[in-house]
Amino acid sequence: MATQPLADRLRPTSFDQVFGQPHLVGPNGILRRLIENDRIPNMIFYGPPGTGKTTVANIIAKLSNMQLYKLNATTASLADIRDVVSSTENMFAKNGTLLYLDEIQYFNKKQQQSLLEFLENGKLTLIASTTENPYFCLYPALLSRSSAFEFKPISIDDCIPTLENALKVLNEDFGDSKTASDALFRTIASTCGGDVRMSIGLLENAFYISGKEITEENVRVLAPSVIGHFDRTGDSHYDLLSCLQKSIRGSDPDAAVFYLAKALLAGELLSVCRRLQVIASEDIGLAYPLAAS
């Protein structure tokens, strides 16, 4: 039995196999056109987890014949980057060095500034990825030397073929013939909010606990209780609270309850209480000054 995670085994190896990012790697995708014309700038990939950022970086390295190094900013240091840069003098990196730096938002301002010297001398091409808004978390000088590309959540329809293939591979691995309905695949894709890696992991776990057919009950006991992506310090946090305030301001009780419930499910009780105080002062205070008390 294979020990490598199923999501990694199913990782696409060409642009044609990548689902859900047609604006980037489809037949007329901007990123695909750049690579096919031998233009590989420094790039920032941003978007939710499980949307193909690492996969696309691997494909770019393969097509460019560049030596690919991967680092994670949560554990990497500038010394690690210098070690990568030193490889440019090595014969094995004759076509250049491509550094994939994951979670770049965890590099502080000084570390991001230090990257500039490596980018400016042309010895290193950077692909940095982040799940946060790069215009908030990255140093402006680094952004000005890079091209930013947004990876969007994978739609349910785009996720289903990957899940079908994942079930086929699992059956082959275990010599089994378990089945799953189209409705189940849609449930898994919907539950995981556009994260393909999470969807494959959920299907894989459900496979182990199911009988001859994987049912919604198998998935329900494994599914996350909080659906979607919610970043307490990023755009999603403030967008959701803003939606709550605007719904109340617009006298739309259904929308207000929806956004309130979504915030509470994400564990944002304190932020909601603070925003309700703001609403009481800003939106209701003029008509009823005692609303905030």
Image (spheres, helix red, strand yellow):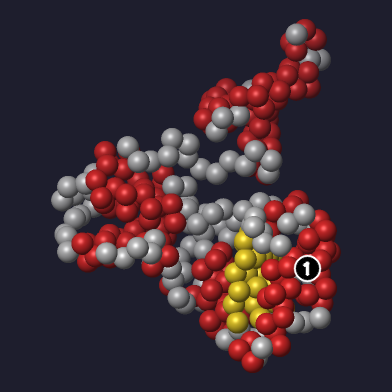
Give x and y (percent) for residue 122.
77, 82
68 above or below 78?
below
Q: Quadrant of the N terminus?
A: bottom left
Task: Give the residue displayed 71% in from the left and 23% down from the top.
Answer: 274
Residue 106 in percent (x, y) is at 70, 53
Nearest to the observer: residue 247 or residue 49: 49
Q: Is residue 158 visible?
A: yes
Is residue 69 or residue 38 the one in the foreground? 69
Asked if residue 150 shows in the view, the reply is: no
Q: Quadrant of residue 150?
A: bottom right
Q: Secondary structure at mark 1?
A: helix
What residue do we see at 65% from left, 73% from top?
A: 99
Amino acid residing under circle 1: Leu
83 is higher (above) or lower (below) than 132: below
Among the 4 quarters of the image, the one containing residue 73: bottom right
Categorize mark 1 by other alpha carbons within 10 Å: few (<14), some (14-19), many (20+): some
Q: Is 231 displayed left or right of 278 in the figure?
A: left
Indicate whether 158 appears above or below 14. Answer: above
Residue drawn 55% across the image and 33% down it = 266
Q: Position of residue 93 (x, y in %)?
A: 64, 87
**Residue 71 at what x, y percent from top left?**
62, 66
- The residue at 74%/52% (across/down) is 137
Q: Which residue is mark 1?
A: 115
